[in-house]
Image (cartoon, helix red, strand yellow):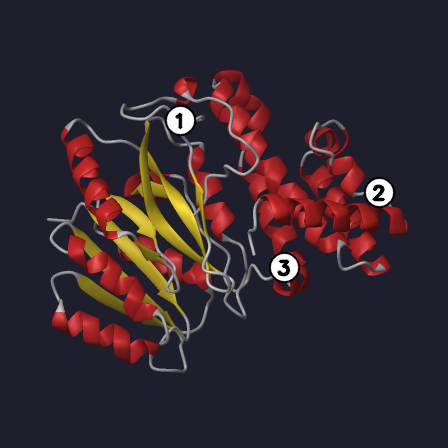
Amino acid sequence: MGKLITFVVPCYNSEGYLRKCVESLLPAKENCEIIIVNDGSTDRTGEIADGYAASAPDCVRVLHQPNGGHGSGINNGLSAAQGTYFKVVDSDDWVDGDALARVIETLGRLEAQGGVDLMVCNYVYEHADTGKRQTIRFGNALPEGRVLTWADTHHFRVSQQLSLHSCIYRTETVRGSGLKLPEHVFYEDNLFVYVPLAFVKKLYYLDADFYRYAIGRVGQSVEKESLKKHSGDQRLVTTLAFAAHDVPAIRRENPELGRYLHHSLSFLMIIAVLFTRIQNTRESDRQVTEFWRELCRIDPKRGKRMKYFSRSGRFLLSLPGYPGRLFCLLIYTISHKVVRFN
């Protein structure tokens, strides 16, 4: 019989922080399975993972794979998962103990009543460099304490993106979406959240500060220089998200779901354009132009509408030449002060 929830921990050269991550999950071992996916690590990550599997064989499993990237780890973890619910916890992050107990109790209660497709919890930015914390909550958008449909949801603020950190999916909801994440691609976790959302009918919001997102560590994919370096991956992920769903059609059938998908896709587009433009080169201008052309090749009408007709200023971010790049740098600076995301 499967456990209530599967925690998948993709890891690559994580010997310095894997223990903290796994130890934070072990208090739920009666109700969870922990699948550690060792993505071709060259340090002691695999050895540490195998040690946990040996000491807690009823709870911990290890998958060793050739290096395929974060997305490959999630794909293989999803294929192996036996839990009713599915949660990805990155190896340099951890979960709060008290909130974990609340998550397990609430999921068990909900499952006894028929279950949900998605549980949303708060997450906390843990700034390693300053020691400060910043919590992202969803109470204004998601009424707490009852099973919701999309019709019960309210406006999501720009800072309230449903993310890998906030989402606990029903395993079969993710599988039923046909999700297959690209390998060796950064920021593919946005697809992990976005693609299954169209298959979510029942939601639940638990106002618990569950996921602890470590930020400020050298070498992270969300560092500014890494975001600039891998802006091509941002554009690829956004293009795949754009092609995944016919959002206008969904919006006609389910206005609130369609509105959120549009909101989320707009955010991905802004990030993709922004971190391409702040490279401040003519080549980055060409890449943005090609990005919009590709979207228009997929769906000409929707691609043009997404670029030119929006309240989010996507067209302004794509203004050609130095003025457009300067505008993007200004937007990045302001956004970073409002929500310090790296």
Residue 45, image x and y in percent? 34, 76
- How many angstroms separate mark 1 from mark 3 (CA)? 30 Å
Residue 305, image x and y in percent? 72, 28
Q: Residue at x 60, y 43 (%)?
A: 338
- How many angstroms separate mark 3 from mark 2 (CA)? 20 Å
Q: Residue at x 42, y 38 (%)?
A: 196
Give 294 or 316, whichever is nearer the viewer.
Answer: 316
Quarter of the picture holding the C terminus: bottom right
Residue 47, image x and y in percent? 27, 80
Could you tell which of marks 1 and 2 lies nearer the N-terminus?
A: 1
Q: Is residue 204 visible?
A: yes
Amino acid under label 2? Leu
Q: Is residue 115 above or below residue 217?
A: above
**Residue 319: which disc?**
2
Q: Residues within 10 Å of mark 2 (few under 14, many from 20)?
A: some
Q: Is residue 166 visible?
A: no
Q: Residue at x 27, y 57 (%)?
A: 80
Q: Residues within 10 Å of mark 1 (few under 14, many from 20)?
A: many
* 145 horizontally vs 11: left or right: left
For mark 1, what is the residue? Answer: 142
* 309 horizontally vs 251: left or right: right
For mark 3, what is the residue? Answer: 227
Marks 1,2: beta carbons within 8 A? no
